[in-house]
Image (spheres, rainbow, N blue to C red):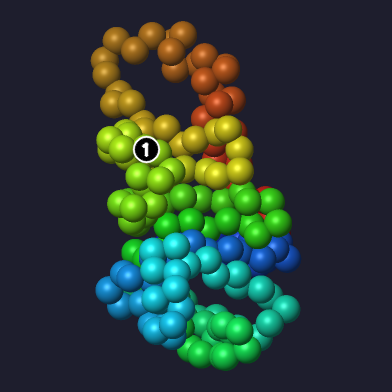
Amino acid sequence: MVHPVQSVIESLQAAGRCPRLHVNAMFEGVVCPDFIRDQWRERLIIDLDPSYPLDLAFLEEALSADLSFGGYVTRCTFPYGSVYVVADRSTGRGIVLDQNMPDSVKRSRYGKGEEAQRPALRTVGSDAEVEDPKPATEGTGPAESTDESQVQKRRAAFKVIDGGG
C-alpha cells in the first residue's frame, strides 16, 4: 500500500508541481546534515524541486533524495513519520498529517489543549477539512444521508490535488 506522503508527492510531480515537505528533523531515523538538524530541528522545510536531479526514491518506511543545502549536496532520508505536511509549493494546497506533527508545532498552530481535537489528516490551502467520520447508526433518516450541502462539503474536502492524468 502506498503511503499518503508518497501518493501526494507523486500526484504533485505528475501535475508538474513542486512538493514542499514540512519535516521533523529530530525524528528518529532522519538522515540529514547535522547543521541542518541543529538549525531547523522540528520545522525543516524541503522543496522537492523537479528541475533539480533529486534521485528521489520511495522506500517502504521512508523517502530519500539528494538534497542541496547551501550548495552542499547530501543524500537525505526522511521516515514517513517525520513528514507532517506535503503541499504544493506555489499554492500551499496539500495534506497535513497531524499525527506526525511535533507537539511544539501543534502548540504554535492550534494553541494549548486544542491539538487533541484536530483531525488526523486534513487539507491545507482551503477552508475544507476532512472531518472525522460519524459512526453509522440505525434510524439515520434520509435527510441526514442525502443533505446536499453536507455532501458538497465532504466532496470539497477531498479535492486536494488535481492531476495525475
Percent from the top left, x then y, of residue 65? Answer: 52, 82
In the displayed structure, 164 sits above or below 38; it is: above
Q: Quadrant of residue 72?
A: bottom right
Q: Quadrant of the N terminus?
A: bottom left
Q: Residue at x 55, y 33 (%)?
A: 128
Q: Residue at x 39, y 52 (%)?
A: 105
Q: Quadrant of residue 82?
A: bottom left
Out of 106 and 124, give the one closest to the viewer. Answer: 106
Residue 72 visible to an observer of this rendering: yes
Q: Residue at x 57, y 17 (%)?
A: 148
Percent from the top left, x then y, of residue 108? Answer: 40, 46
* Left or right side of 159 for 141: left
Provide the residue designation for mark 1. 111
In the displayed structure, 111 sits above or below 11; it is: above
Q: Residue at x 28, y 35 (%)?
A: 113
Percent from the top left, x then y, of residue 7? Answer: 51, 62
Residue 55 visible to an observer of this rendering: no
The amino acid pointed to by label 1 is Gly
Out of 141 and 45, give the one closest to the viewer. Answer: 45
In the displayed structure, 81 sits above or below 147; it is: below
Out of 25 and 128, give the one closest to the viewer. Answer: 25
Q: Quadrant of the C terminus?
A: bottom right
Number of numbered callouts drawn: 1
The secondary structure type at the circle numbered 1 is loop
Q: Quadrant of residue 38?
A: bottom left
Instruction: Give neighbour class at mark 1: few <14, some 14-19, many 20+ (Cα, 10 Å).
Output: few
* Left or right side of 36 for 72: right
